[in-house]
Image (spheres, grey):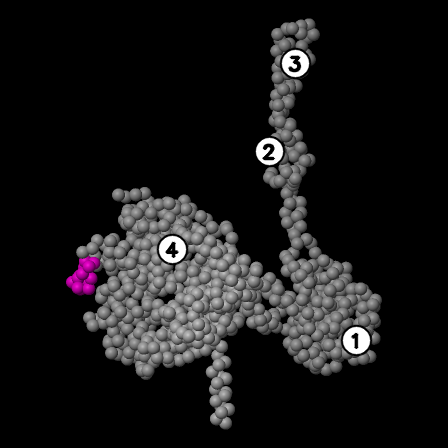
Amino acid sequence: MVQFIDRRHHAKNTSTVSRQRFINRFKKQIKEALSHALSQRSITDIQGGEKISIPKKDIREPFFRYASGGQINHIFPGNKEFIKGDTIARPPVVDTQSLGENASDRGEGEDDFTFEINKDEFLDFFFEDLELPNLVKTELKSIPQFQNVKSGFSRSGSPNNISIIRSFRKALGRRISLSHDKRQKLKIALERLARLPAKIASSSPRRIRLECYIQWMQKEVKAIPFIDTSDILYHRSSPQIVPSSQAIMFCVMDVSGSMDEAKKEMAKRFFILLYLFLTRTYQKIQIIFIRHHTIAKEVNEQDFFYSRETGGTVVSSALELIYKIIVDRYPTNDWNIYVAQASDGDNWNADSPYCQSVLNERIMPLVQYYAYIEIMPRHHQSLWNAYLNVKHKHANFAMQSISKPNELFFALHELFKRNI
Amino acid sequence: MSKKLLPQNSEWTLESLQLYEKAILDIAQAFDLDTYNNQIEIISAEQMLDLYASSGLPINYTHWSFGKRFVNTEKLYRKGYTNLAYEMVINSDPCISYLLEENTMVLQAMVMAHACYGHNSFFKNNYLFKTWTNADSIIDYMVFAKNYIHECEEKYGSTAVEELLDACHALRNYGIDRYKRPQKISLQEEKTRQSERAAYLQSQVNDLWITIPPHFQKNSLTDKKEHFPKEPEENLLYFLEKNAPLLEPWQREIIRISRKIAQYFYPQKLTKVMNEGWATFWHYRIINELYNQKMVSDSFMMEFFKNHTNLIYQLPYDSPGFYGINPYTLGYHLFSDIERICRDPTKEDEVFFPDLTNTPPLEALDFAMRNFKDESFILQYLSPKLIRDLKLFSVLDDSNEPDLKITAIHDEVGYTALREGLSQQYNLDSVEPRIQIYEAHIKSDRAIILRHTQINHRPLDETSTQEVLKHFHALWGFDVILESVSPQGTVLKIVRCPSTAPTVRSNVSAQHTR
């Protein structure tokens, strides 16, 4: 007695829970590996999984085992040149492999245990110390929405999708074509009846035959079903990505000497978060990186994060550049413009009022949202106050002073609230 | 007696699998293979990875180490470093075999003969499996175990359960009765007993002394000398389950579950060579028989031979990928050799195997399959011819000597030594250090003494020993002392957990000298 079962379509991933346990257990190590990985990644490259290495010694499962030493007799196959009594120099790494797994600690070394986590897990870790609200997390992780769009008709479907007009039209056509022959005959018969001379009595066999024939023909025509299963048509719909427009994201960062690596790291997370948010809403996003000290410059991502310059700080230079780029390249009607600015709050004092007016008069009317973070726990300088004034005037301006990553979200809080 | 040619497409279908299975069954019956009923399941590569992770059981509880194994094999597989096994077979009744969907028709046929008839008959008839495993209840037991552990996680938190399982896993090689024979109980009894145990233990809430046999309670301090346990206990998990003072009933039950599972796998550990050898021997015979009956074509056989030779290829010791003796090779040749000796003995065989020369081959094979484990099987059946064919040689690695020494090769004087040497290599003691519970001071400080009997002066690995002792300490709850002793009983080395005691002492003495 034998039983065959095709199990292929049954549940797979029965190890998922264990895998999750494993990842939770080594959270600390994975996070370390991850923050390293994050610094290597581009902002836009945030949607994939990540390769994680953790030190093997951390995840070893211990059991009683032998160390090398003592007397061991190994039996090997494939003797070529040895005879009894020969001696051979001890190989540099003592080979104890034939005696069970991992018998020797030394040979194995401290390799890293490497594996991959998927995009969702990656984002979970990424979000973890940002302490995002759950709703926001799911929102960010979900796939673009599809909408079902009518796309013609099909012969099969569910009853609620029946197209009544189409079905009836088809039934009508079928009835016409199937009854054509019979109606033609009926017509002729009726004509002949009409042409019968009146003198032929109603009881004459000829008239009766003709009348019977007409009755029968009328019945035949009626017998054609009014509607048939083959008539029924269904609306067909196919999924289509909800059309969305394009967005421009400006990343503005102060690169004067006071912005150290840790602050830049924080800024990067901030930019990534905004980027992730925008990918949810817009299909196409262009990122423009603007770094500034006393003069602003449009750069690529590499230069944005990694090249260093020192000098004073004139924020308005960056704002002017944003305005110039918007006016030159992106006519406002077609583009959704977002600006994320990160700075440590330093600015040349006389410049701050000017910044305020550039923002109020030129930039804010053009952009969807402007988020500013100041990565500096200490007291604020003139720029902060100037920006506070902007905030009062414009609801789509957000600012936040940040010392820990979990505060990042508040800068985007309004933005998320609006869209969820 | 030529029969109809079976489907020869390289793609299999469910119908062709059934035809092959029928043909294989007929042949297996003609060879008197006694098997459990077969349940053959086709699975995808992902599902095979899941099976790998749960140590080859279709159902298992959740634990991070299984996740780790999954992540690791998945990575190796995706990168192409490793192939998945063509099949996996569970010692259960009905015997469940998992066939990988990617296999060609030829492989499926080979694998069915290998697993569904080879392994299956071995599981059913080998004495170790008969003694130690209940094929008809293992799946039910795993369902019970999984649910029980899940309930515990809900009641006591997954961290507490995980820590307990970590400790059990570290000791699971020592959750086995090697010598004591078990009585069989059914799942139903197991369940009743479990609830009885839990109820009883619960009723005695946490009294330290309940787990200690009654006569110890009666005894006063007068006979302090009495040794507990009377005989050294090899089953560490069993001892902890029954005697650890501070454990709660659910913890004891989980310890029990881990040692039951360890015990279930114990025969597989002891019969790797025999089990694989038996299955390989039979798939070779059965497929050849299909060919003899003209049920498969020449090209089918060519593909079969390619796979079969790959399977039984033995890398020489000096090739880079050498990982020891291939159990398929050794096992297959041992069984083939028994058949050869029965059919066509040489002069030499008559000297070495006088019993075999007059026995019908099937009878001799059947006897060998039923009554041995790897260690004794090799000792009994490794013939001089096979030693010569495999060109075995023995190397002595003595850490006191500067060089390695060749002690025997495949010649007249070497046969016996090689046979004994190879047999010893499959003795569990040469893979796992022998550690037993020597004494538990249940009446004084509750310290427990473990003894590692040193064989051939082989020392324990210090780091892992320290780690395992921590786990042992977590279960026992009081000081744990591990003594390494020579076979004569001299204590050679002592490891403690917690390890603070000796350091404190040395601090004191250091101050003293100042």
Q: Are marks 4 and 2 on the same chain?
A: no
Q: Nearer the viewer, mark 4 or mark 2?
A: 4
Residue placed at 45% from the left, 61% from the top? B256
- Residue that mark 2 sits on: A230
Q: Nearer the viewer, mark 3 or mark 1?
A: 1
The answer for which chain carries disc 1 is: A
Name the amino acid, label 1.
Answer: Leu
Q: Nearer the viewer, mark 2 or mark 3?
A: 2
Residue B33 vertical position relative to residue B181 in the rendered view, above or below = above
- Residue that mark 3 sits on: A192
Q: Earlier in the sequence, mark 3 or mark 1?
A: 3
Q: Nearer the viewer, mark 4 or mark 3?
A: 4
User: From mark 2 to mark 1, how far is it between C-alphas?
Assistant: 74 Å
The reply to whether the magenta stretch includes residue B345 is yes
Question: Are circles 4 and 1 on residues that touch, CB within 8 Å?
Answer: no
Residue placed at 69% from the left, 54% from the top? A243
Residue B398 drawn at (x, y percent): 32, 79
- Residue that mark 4 sits on: B184
Q: Is residue B390 left or right of residue A335?
A: left
Q: Quadrant of residue A219?
A: top right
Q: Earlier in the sequence, mark 2 or mark 3?
A: 3
Q: Quadrant of residue B156?
A: bottom right
- Residue that mark 1 sits on: A383
